[in-house]
Amino acid sequence: MKRLSSITLLALSTLLATFADAAAAAVTVNYRDTGVGAPVLLIPGLSGCAHGWRGVVPRLEAAGLRVIVVEPLGVGASPRPEGADYSLTAQADRFAALLDSLRVGPAVVVAHGVSVSMALRLAGRRPDLVRAIVALEGGPAESAASPALSSALGKAKLASKLLGMGFVRGRFRGSLEASSGNCDWLDDATLQAYLAGPAADFGAAARAFRAMAQSVEPDSLVPRLPQIACRVSLLIGGAPHAGALPEDQFNAMLRGLRRLTVEKVDGAGHFLHEERPEIVAAEAVAVARATASACDAYALGAGPRGVAPAVGR
């Protein structure tokens, strides 16, 4: 399968690149493209980054899947340009343009937190690109970020100057721990990776999240949920934690989505892909096999009759 040319990165089996948004050449998003097979698109939440999928990606590749990790505009290492459209719909359209550029699809889309709303919008606007969705602790949010989040980042900029980055890291670690059911995943290297993007310029990060909070969606997602025909698997953490899926969004999914399944992951919190990557990967593989085309099914180990073997938890 054709890849963008870069001998060094191909030799490392990792493609790190930027993709120009069709509406504005200056707007780019970071993505990684690895593996060969049916495509899976991984999208971190607003506080996440590509590093967060490190426990999931190798499992998907081992199952014979092509894995594309994309960081939405303003997230992780993706830029935070002023004046850009940070709406959930614009983010979904960027993902569509990326998949079109790579000439892949339909893909299984695995999204975390608010990015689930982007995935649902992508499925509604471009059903030809989405085979199924694995939703991790997220639903049909109508706003990308709260004003409180941009305010917190603005304060982090001041705190980093007055109190040092050690103070900021401690506060950020505390927020991640409060959102987790099991904090074993949160080591110093991971904390550094999560902070790297915003810490490079807290002012730009605060402005980007402010733009997300103020962005206006072209239409509401909840009334359009019945139009989404693909399978949606919702995984939610079973342990008490901050940042859980709001009840109104959960109920909207139950009422509106025609092919919704729900699974509670005991002992886990909001960061399911970090706390239980084996479960997230197994669900993505199972969904890929269950929705595979005839040619994909054989490559994924389902056999010529398309009967998928059981996936262990």
Image: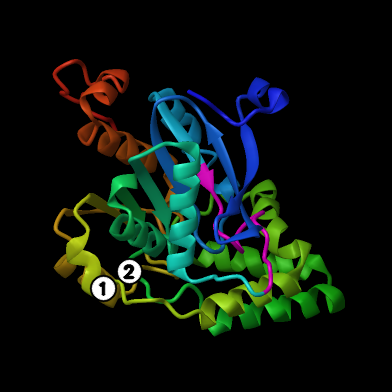
At a point 64% along the width and 83% down the height, the residue shown is: 151
Residue bearing mark 2: 140
At a point 29% along the width and 60% down the height, the residue shown is: 124
Residue 127 magenta-highlighted = no
Disc 2 to disc 1, how far (Cα)? 6 Å
Which mark, residue 295? none
Q: Give the quarter of the image for residue 255.
A: bottom left
**Is residue 120 at least partly visible in the picture?**
yes
Give the mark count: 2
Earlier sequence position, callout 2 versus callout 1: 2
The magenta-colored residue range is: 69-82
| Amino acid type for the residue under numbered disc 1 | Val
Residue bearing mark 1: 222
Q: Residues within 10 Å of mark 1 (few under 14, many from 20)?
A: many
Give the overall secondary structure of the magenta segment.
Answer: loop
At a point 66% along the width and 24% down the height, the residue shown is: 12
Element on which disc 2 rests: loop
Q: Residues within 10 Å of mark 2 (few under 14, many from 20)?
A: many
